[in-house]
Image: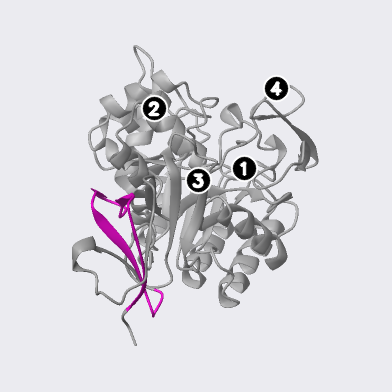
Amino acid sequence: MNGPVKAYIGAQIHDGQTLHTDQALVVNADRSLSVQSRHALSTDCPVETLNGGLITPGFVDLQVNGGGGVMFNDDQSVATLRTMAEAHATAGTQALLPTLITDTPERTRAAIDAVEQAIAEKISGIVGIHLEGPHLSVARKGAHDPHLIRPMSDEDLRLMLSAAERLANVMVTLAPENATTAQIRSLADAGIVVSLGHTDADAATCHAAFDAGARCVTHLFNAMSQLGNREPGLVGATLVRDDIYAGLIADGVHVHPATMRIALSAKPQSERIFLVTDAMATAGSSIKSFLINGREVFRKNQRLTLADGTLAGADLEMPRALSVMIGSVGDDIARAVARATATPATLLREDNGLGHLRGTAQSAVYFKDGLSNPVDFKVIGTRKAG
């Protein structure tokens, strides 16, 4: 039997690309979701009438360092990945790339192994890996350990190419001054999403990396060469290209809302700016501090900082990022939701319908008061991914 088992009506529905009114979200017996006309529902289909609000697809987050009180850099295990995925699922995230920031080759290999095992064990939500470093710029290191930053070697390249053979989705953040265009081209040809970040490179170097196959930028504006009057930097190179995607930490701390608004206005194909949380162990947890590479990170006033005040990831979950985009930045609701759903899913080599309200093993998030109250929501449908 493949017919509908329940339908939800009475709320606006965003299917990942389009905002619908007067439609129904239908949950079918095979766990698939679909958006249909409410007037076309079969008379025997159970219907739940919602009092307004907004339904969206489960979120897709391509940069997640931790959650549920744990960090991937501390423990590269299936247990850690399960805890992270479960913590972010409570905030509506259906699929994520667990992110290992700059670390040793041994921990990098262990992280790849753990993700491969988690996917084999069908840990819901784990769909690949994001290696943020170690091939970065010390000048733009942020919270990364400068002692572990290094140029990309042939062995490093082989490890990442091997990861792409084993995992459907691999993302790598690098600085083009610590990787050659030939290495970038090899990574891109293997299906790896090469993202520029933590770089002090000039615009010409960044354009060369884009032309070699890099197609994304990691947390736009943060830890990168800035837009200046005589040198555009990575920020300028990103904003003038219509073929480049860019992650954005929309917490109002990492980037001022006015700056985000300028970026959306300036960039051709501005829908290619998507949301990431850059979440740390605090996501889905009440902890006040944690360790990263042996250094303590403190949580206060929705900021995560090292002892010297350096930002160290974000105290952020996707519903609040959406609320900031719509309420503070002034982004259109239809585009904002796409930035957390269909747009990041586009970067995945295997998306399996993620970021859309269609297909099997998907989930939806219902915000009872729309995104004006991002803490009042529930997950409906299923949550399986990976």
Q: Looking at the image, which is closer to me, 27 or 182?
A: 27
Per the image, label 3 sits on a secondary structure element best described as: strand
Q: Residues within 10 Å of mark 1 (few under 14, many from 20)?
A: some
Q: Is residue 272 above or below residue 223?
A: below
Q: Is residue 7 above or below residue 216?
A: below
Q: How is the image coloured?
A: one colour
Q: Residues within 10 Å of mark 2 (few under 14, many from 20)?
A: many
Residue 282 lies left or right of residue 343; in this view the side is right
Of helix, strand and loop, which mostly describes the magenta segment?
Answer: strand
Give the residue pinned by disc 3: 173
Residue at position x 34%, y 11% from top?
Answer: 229
**Was residue 60 drawn as part of the magenta stretch in this picture?**
no
- Marks 4 and 3, the one that precedes in the sequence: 3
Checking the image for residue 309, the label placed there is 4
Residue range (magenta)? 4-31
Q: Residues within 10 Å of mark 4 (few under 14, many from 20)?
A: few
Q: CA distance from mark 1 to mark 3?
A: 13 Å
Checking the image for residue 150, the label placed there is 1
Q: CA distance from mark 1 to mark 2?
A: 23 Å
Q: CA distance from mark 2 to mark 3?
A: 15 Å
Q: Position of residue 239 (x, y in %)?
A: 31, 29
Q: Can residue 183 be seen by looking at this rendering?
A: no
Furthest toward the bottom, the residue is 1
Residue 306 lies left or right of residue 216; in this view the side is right
Per the image, label 1 sits on a secondary structure element best described as: loop
Furthest toward the top, the residue is 229
Amino acid at the residue labelled 3 = Thr
Amino acid at the residue labelled 4 = Gly
Query: Of discs 4 and 3, which sits in the foreground?
Result: 4
